[in-house]
């Protein structure tokens, strides 16, 4: 480090360049610069997420109802447990990283090796979990129907109040809709995978089963408060909600339409079947939710992935004794800073995506 | 490479003998806070979801405050911000805090405005 600074003439002179007011090395300062700017990128993403969420504050998907899966526990609703596990894995790998840094300060090469190795494992487990979370999200679970206006209609069992999967609703109608293939098109375009069921099949099945209801994305407002107001539009809104909803008193829940209204909604508005989520369609609610999920957790997952790669490089340098010969383990400290930053970002993503 | 570590957290309430025990102590603190967050997220006590402060549910305020609490300990103890000089601490923290608060403020205000346009406009957005 000293090699980069000329100490002969500038020592002690405030403006001579020899003064180090922050008492941190060049490399560490640059890592902090990077962390601050990268932190601003992430806050830009999260603030944009907040913007979109405030824009659709009365119909945003409820995270607990979206992320309910845990590996190997099929059909058992386990909201949040898996993300909590992922959070713990990442915090744990942060701990092993800081232990590696500490061991580095004491020049204990073998301890640094062990702790770096554990950190890499933790990071890999986290990235793997992230991939699993994505796969589950993309695959979807119950499926839904999309309306002309891009709203999502989900299906419920009237008695149990539980979600019903498309496969349990649809009746089979011999389809006339064929997959458009590359060979048929003049421009050699092929279309994406067709959903398993057509809207007609869902409509027919829904009409045949009187026990089914439709759940829309809008959250139930405080209807008593609406009725108490003097504003005629609010009164009209309260009256129409009381006529159409089943769960009038479930403030903050997703609105469930009564049978009559459900049939009307489905037959009048439904245009497409959605299974799972991509950037354009999302069975859990507004497509923006999926977009932000992919971009924010994807950007973070990419950081973790690069962190693992950088950690592996540093790990091998430690094993080869590079830092032992250099006389200090500051490089471990610098990647440590990056690694903790990734953990720090996850703490915020966890809160704003899964908790709030 | 002389490294001095400050070994107390909670403003000196909790003192550790070595840096390693401090790290484990901080892990325990962070784990407890995460466990509380997850527990609150699953239980969602009604008293916290029905009451609001500045138009936000108390539960969400608690989540955000606990998150900042966790962020503080990650930065201060894992990233060794506690051992850095005041100038570096402030340069990093306040730059971020000011810019982020400003960004969040304008974007959320704007989002809320657009919500009102959708909500009270004459155009139907649900068809």
Image (cartoon, rainbow, N blue to C red):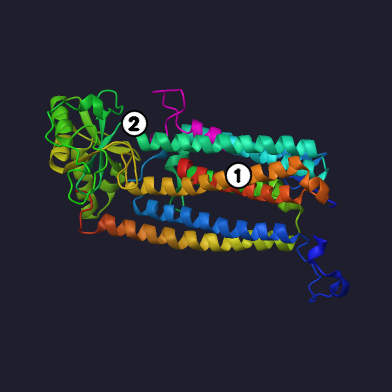
Query: What chain letter is assigned to the residue under label 2?
Result: A
Q: Which residue is mark 1?
A: A309
Front residue of B14/A45: it is A45
Residue at horizontal 86 percent and vertical 72 percent from the top: A12
In the figure, is residue B73 to the left or right of A76?
A: right
Q: For the magenta stretch, what is the residue range? A: A64-88
Residue at horizontal 42 percent and vertical 41 percent from the top: B50
Is A68 a magenta residue?
A: yes
In the figure, is residue A159 to the left or right of A69?
A: left
Q: Kindly tell me whether residue B69 is visible in this rendering.
A: no
Distance Cα–Cα, label 1 vs label 2? 33 Å
Q: Position of residue A61 (x, y in %)?
A: 36, 42
Asked if A174 appears above or below A222 in the picture, the reply is: above
Q: Which residue is mark 2?
A: A141
Residue at horizontal 25 percent and vertical 46 percent from the top: A227
Is A222 a magenta residue?
A: no
Q: Position of residue A316 (x, y in %)?
A: 70, 42
Judged from the image, the secondary structure of the residue bearing numbered disc 1 is helix
Where residue A210 sits, quadrant-wise, is: top left
Whether the residues at callouts 1 and 2 have beta carbons within 8 Å, the answer is no
Q: State which tag comes first along the sequence, 1 or 2.
A: 2
Q: Quadrant of the N terminus of chain A?
A: bottom right
In the figure, is residue A354 to the left or right of A245?
A: right
């Amino acid at each position: 480090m000293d090699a980069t600074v000329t100490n002969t003439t500038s020592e002690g002179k405030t403006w001579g360049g020899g003064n180090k007011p922050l008492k941190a090395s060049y490399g560490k300062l640059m890592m902090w610069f990077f962390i601050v700017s990268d932190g601003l990128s992430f806050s830009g993403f999260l603030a944009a997420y907040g913007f979109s969420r405030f824009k659709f504050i009365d119909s945003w998907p409820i995270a607990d109802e979206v992320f309910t899966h845990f590996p190997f526990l099929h059909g058992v609703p386990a909201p949040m447990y898996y993300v909590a596990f992922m959070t713990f894995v990442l915090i744990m790998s942060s701990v092993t990283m800081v232990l590696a840094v500490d061991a580095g300060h004491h020049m204990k090469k073998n301890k640094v090796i062990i702790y770096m190795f554990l950190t890499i494992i933790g990071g890999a487990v986290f990235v793997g979990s992230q991939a699993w979370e994505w796969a589950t999200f993309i695959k979807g679970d119950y499926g839904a129907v999309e309306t002309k206006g891009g709203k999502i209609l989900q299906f419920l069992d009237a008695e149990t109040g539980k979600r019903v999967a498309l496969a349990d609703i649809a009746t089979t109608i011999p389809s006339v809709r064929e997959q458009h293939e590359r060979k048929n098109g003049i421009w050699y375009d092929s279309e994406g995978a067709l959903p398993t069921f057509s809207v007609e099949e869902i409509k027919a099945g829904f009409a045949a089963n009187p026990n089914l209801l439709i759940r829309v994305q809008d959250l139930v407002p405080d209807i008593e408060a609406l009725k108490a107001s003097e504003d005629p539009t609010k009164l009209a809104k309260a009256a129409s909600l009381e006529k159409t909803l089943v769960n009038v008193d479930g403030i903050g829940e997703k609105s469930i339409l009564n049978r009559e209204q459900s049939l009307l909604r489905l037959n009048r508005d439904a245009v497409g079947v959605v299974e799972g989520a991509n950037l354009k369609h999302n069975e859990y609610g507004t497509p923006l939710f999926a977009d932000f999920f992919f971009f924010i957790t994807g950007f973070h997952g990419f950081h973790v992935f690069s962190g693992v790669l950088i950690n592996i490089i540093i790990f091998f340098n430690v094993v080869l004794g590079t830092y032992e010969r250099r006389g200090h383990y500051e490089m471990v400290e610098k990647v440590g800073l990056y690694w903790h930053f990734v953990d720090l970002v996850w703490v915020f993503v966890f809160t704003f995506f899964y908790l709030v | 490479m002389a490294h001095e570590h400050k070994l107390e957290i909670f403003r000196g309430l909790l003192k550790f003998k070595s840096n390693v025990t401090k790290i484990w102590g901080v892990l325990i603190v962070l784990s407890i806070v995460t466990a509380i967050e997850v527990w609150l997220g699953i239980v969602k006590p009604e008293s916290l979801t029905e009451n609001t402060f500045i138009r936000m549910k108390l539960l969400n305020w608690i989540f955000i405050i606990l998150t900042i609490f966790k962020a503080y300990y990650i930065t201060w103890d894992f990233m060794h911000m506690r051992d850095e000089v005041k100038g570096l601490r402030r340069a990093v923290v306040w730059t971020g805090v000011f810019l982020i608060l400003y960004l969040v403020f304008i974007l959320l205000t704007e989002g809320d405005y657009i919500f009102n346009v959708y909500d009270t406009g004459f155009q139907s957005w649900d068809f």
